[in-house]
Amino acid sequence: MVPSAGTRYAETTDGAYVAYQVTGAGPDLLAVFAHGISVEDQIAGPTCGPFIERLSAFSRVIRFDRRGTGLSDPIARIDETTWEHWLDDAVAVLDAAGATAVTVFAADMPAGVVCMLLTASVPRRVSRLVLFNPNARWRSDRDYPWGLSPQEQERFLDAIRDEWLRGGPTPLPFPGLAGDETLARWWRGARRRGMSPSVAGAVYRTGMASDLRVVLPSIRVPTLVLTRPLASPDADRLRQRVAYVVARIPGARAVELAGEDPVAYVGDHEAVAREIEEFVTGSRSTPPADRALATVMFTDLVGSTEQLTRLGDRAWRHLLDAHDAMIRAQLAAHRGSEVKMTGDGVVATFDGPARAISCARAVVDGAAALGLTVRVGLHTGEVELRGDDIGGLTVHIGARVAQSAGPSEVLVSRTVVDLVAGSGLRFADRGEHELKGVDGPWRLYAVVG
């Protein structure tokens, strides 16, 4: 078994503790295992342990338990869990491990969500990305027919309930090792130790509601996509999902491996390790620092001209100063970054849409306490970093969303709604809008509650 430094804990910015382990030496590799199995159960697994040992032969492997799973702190509100929390966990672990630019490796399909968001949102921390059987969206629709139908989603969630609540003989998700009782005992025991029934249900419901298609073009690091085609009848759907991801990540390279097991550490994991080793230890490249995925917030005062006329210049100036101070306080509390004050509002960015929504609601309330009314618009996408300023289509869309908002309303794009699936946030459909200068109709939603 590979020597381990033991389980350590990293503290997140909101005071949670995340369990992690570091093994091996060499270039940093952040390996993400998303099935809720703790770092200690991973390394003791009959196939997972040897796979980690193989990766540790050529890299410094960093693994962690997301909040709510394994040895990490529990989640306070299961119904308000988002990928954003787990993104924060990954950054905290990188900081604690002293890792700067790492190769990020998703060992299974659910792990790909965290890994793709991390790579797109914090590009300075990621030098390479390796995805295994990735998927941008679990649900099927007219534009994405390779996902799960509503009936398939319900059957999947029923199987999860059976596995945890009734302890039923859930079939192994590894066709190649269906008769391996040692692996079966480890898998079922490790899964139940790693996640409670409510966490398991929340994790998979969040995954099924998520849509990462907008994230893919923002991934600007060398990307290796590894896949094993599942046994019929799902092989074609898997290939289509993987092909969709590969086609939309700039420069991504795909390698199809022999076998049919849907996680990297089961089946021929040596072939997986060889591909990763060549990718990690080859020529190095630095990700561009001029683009990043961000949630952009625009705020605007309603009726400012009328208030200026009523109050006069000096009183209005004092009120604006109080307004600006309130906004800056809320940005600091929600980890937002001020881009610029616009006179009647602010342009700001966030590394997560749920935090942006929370800040937007606080700004609306803070303005009301000052006797002011604001409207707020939010959109998530890739932005161009221009020194202290930002640019690109995402910025234009965010501004147009804000212009469409009503007084005291926080209006968001469909992209934002998809990225906070499972958070407990509620939205009212405001229908399709034509956004000036932006092609096509855009469906917008108001934050409610």
Image (tube, rainbow, N blue to C red):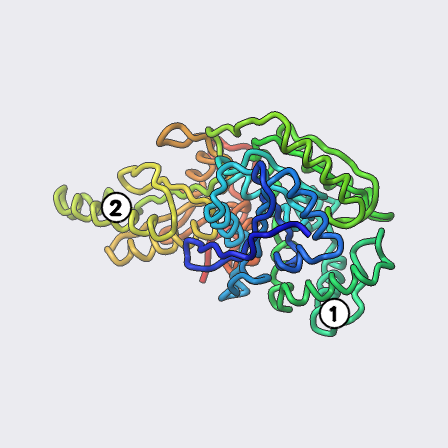
Residue drawn at (52%, 49%) of the image: 90
Report which residue position mark 1 lands on.
162
Q: Residue furthest bottom?
A: 166
Q: Is residue 298 left or right of residue 272?
A: left
**Disc 1 marks which amino acid?**
Asp
User: At numbered mark 2, what does the secondary structure look like: helix, strand or loop?
Assistant: helix
User: At numbered mark 1, what does the secondary structure look like: helix, strand or loop?
Assistant: helix
Residue neighbourhood size for the residue with mark 2, other residues' Cα within 10 Å, grouped as few (<14), some (14–19), many (≥20): some
State the residue in front, 280 or 426.
280
- Residue 64 image position (x, y, % from top left): 57, 53
Residue drawn at (42%, 51%) of the image: 410
Q: Earlier in the sequence, mark 1 or mark 2?
A: 1
- Between the residue at mark 1 and the residue at mark 2, the CA separation in whole angstroms equals 53 Å
Q: Which mark is residue 324?
A: 2
- Residue 209 image position (x, y, % from top left): 62, 54
State the residue in front, 16 or 447.
16
Check whether the beta carbons of the residues at disc 1 and disc 2 lie within 8 A of each other: no
Q: Which mark is residue 46?
A: none
Q: Is residue 368 above or below residue 95?
A: below
Q: Is residue 127 above or below residue 151?
A: above
Q: Is residue 231 left or right of residue 398?
A: right
**Disc 2 marks which amino acid?**
Asp
